[in-house]
């Protein structure tokens, strides 16, 4: 499939996990892709970028548009996690997580807009999470940040739909990525924690990074031109399904 032929995309947080899978998929389908990541780790087409630094974001976005003469797709994927109940995170941690997960997307989109307005196939896809609407224990701060991303996506879609800029988001469930691996490694018994997490999934497995990337590519593709303000869950049915216990 070459639906992204001739298009230029940036993927934030694209050095690993969902972001890396997305960058590779868009490239395989014809896009010129540049990864913006805090630590791009020697990726051939990447710019070291801290999404909490507005000047760095503007410089990186403008550099991509100048190099290729256009910018068509923005995948806002950079994000960090947080664990704890309402008393479990300091004010400084709240500010840092919201700065990365929400304001990071705002900065990237804000500086991409002048370039996207010149594209005939402009699309922004934000990475949200099912915790935006499904209450999960010990995820207050992370859930609040992703709830903001959900609302941000819908508001952006309303603001820019008539400019021809489609804004959508994906809402993954628990994805099998290095991010989740790091969380499991912090448990007293990592193997037991992973087994419990897996058994909780209606399909008996975690979501793969490639599956989330496929959903992102669908929303970013010109072939999905009628998808505007869409929130696409990629969660193994975790939110919507209620399965009877087996055995």
Image (tube, rainbow, N blue to C red):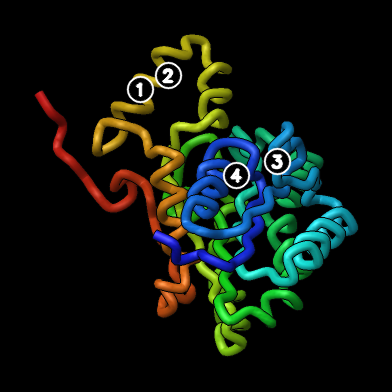
Residue sitting nearer the eye, 152 or 222 = 222
Residue 174 screen position, x and y as percent: 43, 38
**Residue closest to the far top:** 189
- For marks 4 and 1, the one nearer the N-term is 4
Report the disc number at residue 142: 4
The Cα atoms of the two marked residues, 4 and 1, are separated by 21 Å
Above or below for 40 versus 103: above
Residue at which label 1 appears: 196
Above or below for 44 versus 186: below
Classify 10 Å Cα crowding around label 3: few (below 14), some (14-19), many (20 and above).
Answer: few
- Tags 1 and 3 in contact by the CB under 8 Å rule? no
Residue sitting nearer the eye, 77 or 116 = 116
Q: Secondary structure at mark 1?
A: helix
- Tags 2 and 1 in contact by the CB under 8 Å rule? yes
Residue 184 screen position, x and y as percent: 51, 21
Classify 10 Å Cα crowding around label 1: few (below 14), some (14-19), many (20 and above).
Answer: few
Q: Residue at x 80, y 43 (%)?
A: 48
Q: Which quadrant of the rendered structure holds the C terminus?
A: top left
Report the disc number at residue 193: 2
Residue sitting nearer the eye, 169 or 18 = 18
Q: Secondary structure at mark 4?
A: helix
Residue sitting nearer the eye, 102 or 25 = 25
The Cα atoms of the two marked residues, 4 and 3, are separated by 31 Å
- Tags 4 and 3 in contact by the CB under 8 Å rule? no
- For marks 3 and 2, the one nearer the N-term is 3
Residue 56 screen position, x and y as percent: 86, 54
Asked which quadrant contains residue 175, the reply is top left
Residue 96 showing in the rendered view: yes
- For marks 2 and 4, the one nearer the N-term is 4
Above or below for 84 versus 34: above
């Amino acid at each position: 499939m070459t639906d992204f032929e001739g298009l230029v995309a940036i993927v934030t947080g694209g050095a690993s996990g969902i972001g890396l899978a997305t960058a590779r998929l868009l490239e395989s389908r014809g896009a010129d892709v540049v990864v913006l990541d805090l630590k791009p780790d020697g990726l051939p087409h990447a710019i070291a970028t801290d999404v909490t630094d507005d000047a760095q974001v503007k410089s990186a976005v403008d550099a991509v548009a100048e190099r290729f003469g256009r910018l068509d797709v923005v995948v806002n994927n950079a994000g960090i996690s947080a664990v704890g109940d309402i008393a479990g995170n300091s004010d400084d941690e709240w500010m840092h997580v919201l700065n990365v997960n929400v304001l990071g997307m705002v900065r990237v989109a804000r500086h991409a807009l002048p370039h996207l307005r010149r594209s005939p196939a402009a699309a922004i896809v934000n990475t949200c999470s099912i915790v935006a609407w499904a209450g999960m224990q010990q995820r207050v701060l992370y859930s609040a940040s992703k709830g903001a991303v959900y609302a941000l996506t819908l508001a952006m879609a309303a603001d820019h739909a008539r400019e021809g800029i489609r804004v959508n988001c994906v809402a993954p469930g628990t994805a099998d990525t290095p991010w989740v691996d790091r969380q499991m490694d912090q448990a007293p018994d990592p193997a037991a924690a992973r087994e419990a997490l897996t058994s909780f999934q209606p399909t008996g497995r975690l979501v793969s990074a490639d599956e989330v990337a496929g959903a992102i590519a669908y929303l970013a593709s010109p072939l999905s031109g009628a998808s505007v303000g869409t929130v696409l869950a990629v969660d193994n049915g975790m939110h919507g399904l209620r399965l009877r216990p087996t055995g």
